[in-house]
Amino acid sequence: MRKPRWNAMVVAAVLTFAGPALGSTDAGQRVIDVKSMSVADLEKAGELCRMHKDYEGAILYFREAVRRDRKSATLRNKLGLAELQAGQSDLARSDFETAAKLNPKYAEALNNVGAVYFMQNKSGAAAKYFKKAVALDETRATFHVNLGAAWFNQKKFERAINEYTRALELDPQVMEEHSRIGVSAQVTNTEERGKFYYMLAKIQAKHGNVDECLSCLRKAKENGYRDLANVYKEEEFSRVWTDARLAQLVPAPVAK
């Protein structure tokens, strides 16, 4: 069974990207006169640049495409992604917001606005936009992960648990690092980090993911979580009580 690879800052809150680009290109092609290219060609060139991590080139092509088609929410969103990857977060947020205004039902753009706020440690604003994305498309597991991360940063742990639980219901693999770029929950100290891993362990246990549960419990222990013995008191962990590996992590209570 594949195990999730947890970063030090824990949970992946994934930005929504366009599909993978096709073909190949190199930076030298930027000398092409962009004004002679069609909007479709500009979009494809921008995607190729992003694929090759040539973000400045991607911005060049997407900006010209947006100049030609100012009503395209998709192009605005792609421009924002290139800007974000180039480290231009304020410009990216502005373009994501414009994309959302052009298409108020564009859940990905709203999610991406939230992601920028999250990266800027503005969890309250991030949660606002993640909630809007969830409202538009409740079936997107990554939106729930994002919202859960925002709630966790605000110490609203029960709300965070609810979002992570729903995310795992929608996609059991969503907590794995399979995205090309992401942001992480800003766990500021080991005590909070330990609590976070314990919370994730409970969610994994509830879904019957024993290996993942034990992995999270191990991380909680490594980060000094003080109430690890509660694993034998909370019904959510009942599926792992008989697993010998649990007793190695947390000694079972002695019968009186």
Image (cartoon, helix red, strand yellow):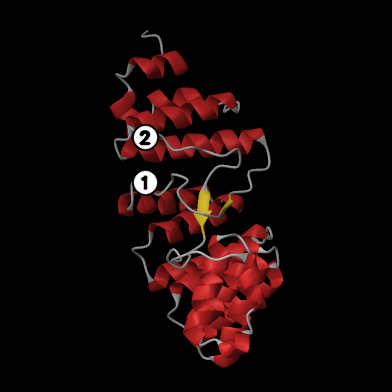
Q: Is residue 160 above or below residue 109?
A: above
Answer whether labels 1 and 2 touch (C-beta < 8 Å). Answer: yes
Q: Residue at x 40, y 15 (%)?
A: 247
Q: Residue at x 45, y 65 (%)?
A: 23
Q: Residue at x 70, y 71 (%)?
A: 90
Q: Is residue 151 above or below residue 190?
A: below
Q: Tell me if I can see residue 138 in this picture.
A: yes
Percent x, y of residue 20:
44, 63
Q: Which mark is residue 173?
A: 1
Please, what secondary structure does the residue beneath circle 1 have?
A: loop
Identify residue type, mark 2.
Answer: Arg
Name the foreground residue: 61 vs 227. 61
Q: Residues within 10 Å of mark 2 (few under 14, many from 20)?
A: few
Q: What is the distance, in whole Å, between disc 1 and disc 2 at their CAs?
A: 9 Å
Nearer the viewer's eye, disc 1 or disc 2?
Answer: 2
Percent x, y of residue 54:
63, 64
In the picture, measured across the screen, residue 243 lies left or right of residue 83, that is left
Image quadrant where one finds the C terminus: top left
Q: Which residue is mark 2?
A: 2
In the picture, measured across the screen, residue 245 lies left or right of residue 50, that is left
Q: Residues within 10 Å of mark 1 (few under 14, many from 20)?
A: some
Identify residue type, mark 1.
Answer: Gln
Q: Earlier in the sequence, mark 1 or mark 2?
A: 2
Name the foreground residue: 226 vs 36. 36
